[in-house]
Amino acid sequence: MIVIVGGGQAAAQLVFSLRQGGGQERILLLSEETHLPYQHPPLSKAYLSGAVDRQRLWIRSADFYRDRDIDLRPGQRVVNVDRAALEVHTAAGECFAYDRLALTCGARVRRLAVPGDTLQGVHYLRTLDDADALVHALQDAVNVVVVGGGFLGLEFAAMGTFLGKSVVLLETAAQLIPRVGAACIREFYRARHEQHGVRVHTGVQVAEFAGADGRVREVRCGDGAVHPADVVLVSVGVIPNTELAEAAGLETCNGVLVDAQARSSDPAVVCAGDLAACVQTWAHDTTAAIRLESVQNATDQARTAAATLLGEAPREGTPVPWFWSDQYKLKLQMAGLSGGHDTQVVRGQPDTAAFAVCYFREAQFIAMDSIARPADHAAARKLLARGVALTPEQAADENFALKSLL
Ligand SMILES: Cc1cc2nc3c(=O)[nH]c(=O)nc-3n(C[C@H](O)[C@H](O)[C@H](O)COP(=O)(O)OP(=O)(O)OC[C@H]3O[C@@H](n4cnc5c(N)ncnc54)[C@H](O)[C@@H]3O)c2cc1C
């Protein structure tokens, strides 16, 4: 029996890959949420405007799990893993035995510890239920304040303006999207948001959410600024759900430590997705385990975990990381990991809103962030995966077709 804890992106891929790979073992999928496993990306994008409906969020239909004999049990929170007895226990008091266990419990939102954080109208966004609450709250809202200028906060700000709201965006760091390596991309997005009417304030700390009758009315900042608010979205990062693994004595470090085969410190336990911390072939520091929060990582790592459970030959290294973000009508695509780069080369003109930044470390091409250049993104992923050399001069020449190197 394979027991999977957590019913999100990684779990859905894991069961698919197990059956696709010929696995006949019984599979029990225990998921805390009451929904079928669903895609998260639309929740901060088209789902908020109604352009994507609920049915399109499900990664697989209910029939898919039934037809493949996958025992999917929504609404089941696992509260304990007993590795000695090879059992998991649920909050409802049930006990299930396993031969192998997969932890795909993901992450939860980091809460902002300031006064007023529990007022009605102060929202966080991780789950479908969170998104439904936001859709409802936005209906009558005039003033929206977004706390946090990462990808999720920016996507929400873009949707807020699309829905006709007055949007203020507050970020503690000096610049938006610190995860992006190139200042020109961070500045491009700031300008784009300001053009759409978002009032962006960087270098500010939220001091308090203030309200009346239990409802938020304004956001007060450390610099004395006060922003009226009917709806606040706090988006200041996530915390991996490591508690089960920690209590079970698995090795953890800001995530469950896994090797390139998705194996935890217990050979009977694999882990994948936002919860897993792994040394990445593509990172600057190849000694430290890191977590990648992306659909690509969840699906690729789940494929690897399935291969491990099926006893397939070990895979070499970790796949090239990639990520995307949709804001307004622009798609930002990231390939590789730009941390530790020493050279940046801009490809194309930022003022055309279709350009890329290529990152190099010791003359080696390591990553690309591109806006509205899907062909360059696709080529970059292949160049990285195949270890094909790209020079800064070739990257800078917009007329040089990257795919000609493949
Ligand atoms: C709003 C939003 C937008 C995003 N947009 C993008 C994007 O544009 N591009 C991109 O690449 N990535 C995006 N991501 C990130 C991506 O969705 C995640 O990296 C991915 O969902 C991680 O998959 P996972 O299976 O590890 O975790 P999840 O999909 O979060 O699934 C974990 C599941 O485990 C359940 N669980 C936790 N603990 C227990 C327990 N004890 N017992 C039972 N069940 C448990 C949770 O309730 C949850 O259902 C976005 C994420 C969010 C929230």
Image (tube, rainbow, N blue to C red):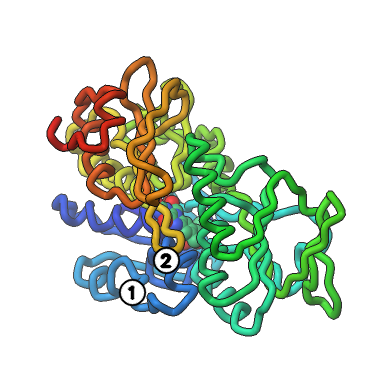
Q: Quadrant of residue 52?
A: bottom left
Q: Quadrant of residue 51?
A: bottom left
- Label 2 sits on what residue type? Pro
Q: Which residue is depicted at the point 22% across and 25% down?
A: 387
Q: Which residue lies furthest to the top in this view?
A: 362
Between residues 146 and 87, which one lies in front from this camera angle?
146
Tell me the quarter of the image containing the C terminus: top left
Mark 1 in CB contact with mark 2 (< 8 angstroms): yes
- Label 1 sits on what residue type? Arg
Left or right position of 242 against 145: left
Q: Which residue is depicted at the point 16% across and 55% down?
A: 20
- The disc at residue 42 is 2
Q: Which residue lies furthest to the bottom in this view?
A: 140
What residue sits right under mark 1 in the picture? 56
**Residue 375 is at least partly visible in this image:** yes
**Residue 402 is at least partly visible in this image:** no
Between residues 194 and 235, which one lies in front from this camera angle?
194
**Residue 31's spot in the image, x, y percent?**
44, 63
